[in-house]
Image (spheres, helix red, strand yellow):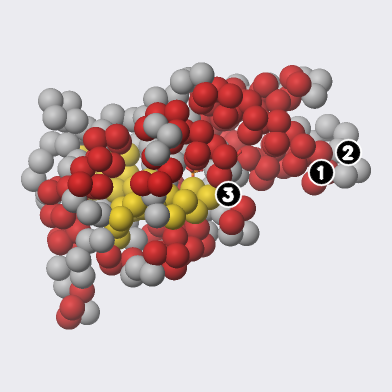
Amino acid sequence: MKLEALIFDVDGTLADTERDGHRVAFNQAFVEVGLDWDWSVELYEKLLAVTGGKERIRYFLDEFNRDFPRPPELDDFIAGLHKSKTQHYTNLLGQGAIPLRPGVERLLNEARVAGLRLAVATTTTPANVEALLINTLGPDSMSWFEVIAAGDIVPAKKPAPDIYDYALQEMKLQPAQCLAFEDSENGIKSSLGAKLTTIITINDYTHSHDFNGAALVLDQLGEPGQPFTVLQGGGVEGDYVNIDLLMQLHATQHAFDATT
Ligand code: XBP
Ligand code: MG
């Protein structure tokens, strides 16, 4: 099958948003409502075990702050906090706090020129995706993506495959026609669960995750003159991720599809 589309995770993959974006915004929301909670860089690494901001707040209460007297309407309390967090997060992005990772803008542009279809599959809130894209790639960039599968659009977030399944369904594509880009263990569990060949670019929070099953694990997508380091997998020519390298990878991963 021909390579038709690229599907991108957002947080950690398009941009390093967690430590200086999401984490900071959660803390700002806590201050705003008078909570003395403070999610340090170290604690946040543990909290990232759970995807989704609302789910993460609940996990924090269950595992790291059991003595906190829970409000009677806990769902509403968490939803309110999370709404404020989203506001703070989109404000941070509006101030240009988080750039795209190396190679992301170039690869998206090359994919568009090559006629590859683009999609997003993320657990983050849709407003966060919009804020990131608009503030880094410009006002038109939302339209570059045929499907933006995000947040509560599916009930089961990553590591469940549902968000990728949803994106594939919307694009009417088979997994073998696509490549997925991820940065985390929960992310690759989700993409592999949807049977997608997956390329990983690690970051500071995910470098020690288990990426068993990845087609390629890299430190970054790289740029001309700024080569990637291969951490797992390989067998492709090139030192930065471009369309030619993706075609090679897709061909090697699907060489036996017709006979199996
Ligand atoms: C990353 C996440 C998200 C964000 C918070 O998702 O786990 O939960 O940290 O986003 P991905 P919200 O890597 O799949 O993009 O607070 O909007 O849920
Ligand atoms: Mg991610």
Residue found 17% across the figure and 80% down from its top: 259
Question: What kind of residue is marked 1?
Answer: Asp
Q: Nearer the viewer, mark 2 or mark 3?
A: 3
Question: What kind of residue is marked 3?
Answer: Gly
Residue at far bottom of view: 259
Question: What kind of residue is marked 2?
Answer: Pro
Neighbours of disc 1 within 10 Å: few (<14), some (14-19), many (20+): few
Q: Is residue 169 above or below residue 36?
A: below
- Which image quarter is the N terminus in? bottom left
Q: Which residue is mark 2?
A: 71
Residue found 83% across the figure and 32% down from its top: 68
Q: Are circles 1 and 2 on residues that touch, CB within 8 Å?
A: yes
Residue found 59% across the figure and 28% down from its top: 89
Residue found 27% across the figure and 65% down from its top: 177
Residue 37: horizontal and vertical position, in percent? 73, 23
- Mark 2: which secondary structure? loop
Q: CA distance from mark 2 to mark 3?
A: 24 Å
**Residue 248 placement, left or right of 47:** left
Q: Which residue is mark 1?
A: 76
**Residue 155 placement, left or right of 174:** right
Q: Which residue is mark 3?
A: 151
Q: Earlier in the sequence, mark 1 or mark 3?
A: 1
Judge by depth and name the residue closer to the eye, 138 or 188. 138
Judge by depth and name the residue closer to the eye, 74 or 102. 102
- Which image quarter is the C terminus in? bottom left
Inspect this view and state whether residue 11 appears: yes
- Mark 3: which secondary structure? helix
